[in-house]
Amino acid sequence: MTLQDKIALVTGASRGIGKATVSLLRENGATVIGCSRGSDTDFCCDVSSSKDVHALFEHIKTHYGQLDILVNNAAMIKPGPITSQPLSEWDDHYQTNVRGLVHCCQHAFQLMAPNGGCIVNVSSLAGFQGAEKFPGFSAYVASKSAVTGLTEALAVEGKPLGIRVNAIAPGAVNTQMLKGIAPDLKTTTEPEDIAQLILGLVHPLQSKSLNGTILPVYSNE
């Protein structure tokens, strides 16, 4: 079974994991709307903006009439020590990494409710209990920990609607974001590797019994 006739939305789709996921879902037959803050994807949307998110889902509702798959990949990160990082940067993490994800899920639940669907939230090992954390990443860790908890909570709410909600929690992945914040950190994990795992989580045959699962991905460095 392919993803033929499935409508998918991937946020943060201009590069890295999001871009690789858009490509792979399309290869497997899905119709995919990729969105990002820039103009190099199918739809321009800053998920931290309620106006943008509303416009995005109105576009999907008008042009496709359904949504079967949502991959919440959009995220931001600004490292800084707890003693001096401005609270405004904590707010920035929350607005994009948490509030934006919640807003997308609210709209997705409404579109998916008649026929069910699948949501994959891209968290991080930073938000996975027991994984080693790095100094200066408290705001990011807090936001991704919220994504992990939200995934488990939304899986419960989605179950009676036929909506599965899972998360993937990668460690270091060879992306522009990693190069920007940790240029000396090397990893063999590529965005395409994470995209393959996301495909498994949305595929109706490979993961139909998975709900509320947080899948950690420890990089083979």
Image: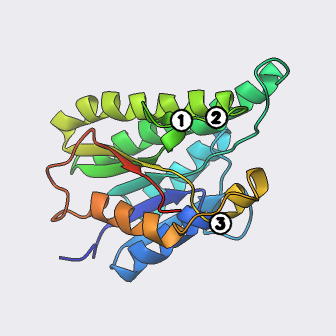
User: Within the image, what quadrant is residue 187 found in?
Assistant: bottom right
Residue density around tag 2, few if under 14, some if 14–19, many if 20 or more, within 10 Å:
many
Residue density around tag 3, few if under 14, some if 14–19, many if 20 or more, within 10 Å:
many
Instruction: Say if residue 103 shows up in the picture.
Output: no
Q: Earlier in the sequence, mark 3 or mark 1?
A: 3
Name the residue: 49% across, 42% down. Answer: 125
Residue 90 in the image: above or below residue 45: above
Instruction: Say if residue 202 shows up in the picture.
Output: yes
Residue at the disc numbered 2: 140
The answer for how far apart the CA atoms under marks 3 and 2 are is: 21 Å
Residue at the disc numbered 3: 14
Residue kind at label 1, given as amino acid type: Lys
Q: What SS does tag 2 mark?
A: helix
Name the residue: 60% across, 69% down. Answer: 42
Residue 64 in the image: above or below residue 46: below
Pointer 1 with pointer 2, Cβ within 8 A: yes
User: Residue 139 placed where, x, y %?
Assistant: 67, 28
Camera-nearest label, 3 or 1: 1
The answer for how far apart the CA atoms under marks 3 and 1 are is: 20 Å
Does residue 62 appear to the left or right of 151 in the view shown? Answer: right
Name the residue: 28% across, 42% down. Answer: 213
The answer for how far apart the CA atoms under marks 1 and 2 are is: 6 Å
Q: What SS does tag 1 mark?
A: helix
Residue at the disc numbered 1: 144
Residue at far top of view: 83
